Image (cartoon, helix red, strand yellow):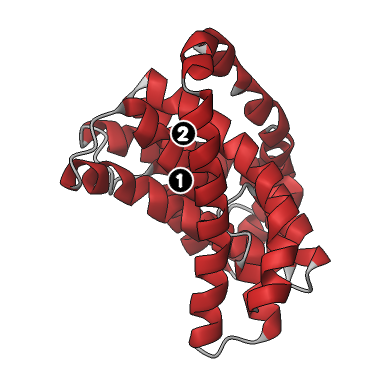
Amino acid sequence: MVGDPVSFWVYLASSPLFWLTLTLAAYLAADRLAALTGRHPAANPVLITIAIVGAVLIGTGTDYPTYFAGAQFIHVLLGPATVALAIPIVRYRAEIRRNVVPLFGALLVGSVTGVASAVLIAAALGGSPALIASIAPKSVTAPIAMGVAREVGGVPELTAVLVIATGITGAVLVTPLMNLLRIRDWRARGLAVGLAAHGIGTARALQVNPVAGTFAALAMALNGLATALIAPFIVRLLG
């Protein structure tokens, strides 16, 4: 078997542990690279991991169901990882209480703007109704976004891709953009990235500052709820 590379690859690729191991190894390598760059925004570990795993899948002609059968354990951990974001929220609950009014004001404006801008831009560029519905919930975490897209006539699989792209873009741009705008308040920075870039942006905020990460986690959770309520209305009104 070892003497025949094709047979060896077929054997290796059929093992679920291979794809799990590949994903974890790719992320560890990506995280190490990000650390070597001083956590530069462009060296986002999620983006690098996607590039590595995607290149392997394309290069070997492996379909997604085969990959997911092996890597689904990571998918299962998304739930506990999201729940764990409650820890910094509890830790900084006093700070949150002191800013509850501007927090909810920003949540309302950010949620409506995130959905409405996506719908209007997609419609102006001639997007189909299915595309418009798919892109509307792009700024919330994937499970909620896919559910919203399904309800308003979108394609959940396309929404998942758009959600990941939005999260990575937000995580890469948030630090240089906030610095350019001279926004120094960590609460505002975290809230902005949590509203716009869900979990991936929140992970970046937690790396930069604990207060920013806390407000990002809270914004991500609340924006998921707000978007689920307002997206269907905005899609029907503007789409």
x and y percent of residue 194 in the render?
49, 40
Residue 152 lies in quadrant = bottom right
Would residue 137 appear left or right of 114 to someone viewing this image?
right
On screen, residue 117 above or below 81:
below
x and y percent of residue 148 in the render?
75, 59
Q: Nearer the viewer, residue 46 or 199?
A: 199
State the mark number for residue 46: 1
State the mark number for residue 203: 2
Mark 2 burial class by Cα count in 10 Å: few <14, some 14-19, many 20+: many
State the mark number for residue 117: none
Mark 1 burial class by Cα count in 10 Å: few <14, some 14-19, many 20+: some
Q: Residue at x 27, y 34 (%)?
A: 39
Q: CA distance from mark 1 to mark 2?
A: 10 Å
Residue 230 lies in quadrant = bottom right
x and y percent of residue 29 in the render?
39, 38
Instruction: Select label 1 or label 2 by which is in front.
Output: 2
The C terminus sits in image quarter:
bottom right
x and y percent of residue 191 in the render?
45, 36
Do callouts 1 and 2 mark residues in contact (Cβ within 8 Å)?
yes
Q: Residue at x 24, y 37 (%)?
A: 183
| Residue type pointed to by label 1 | Val
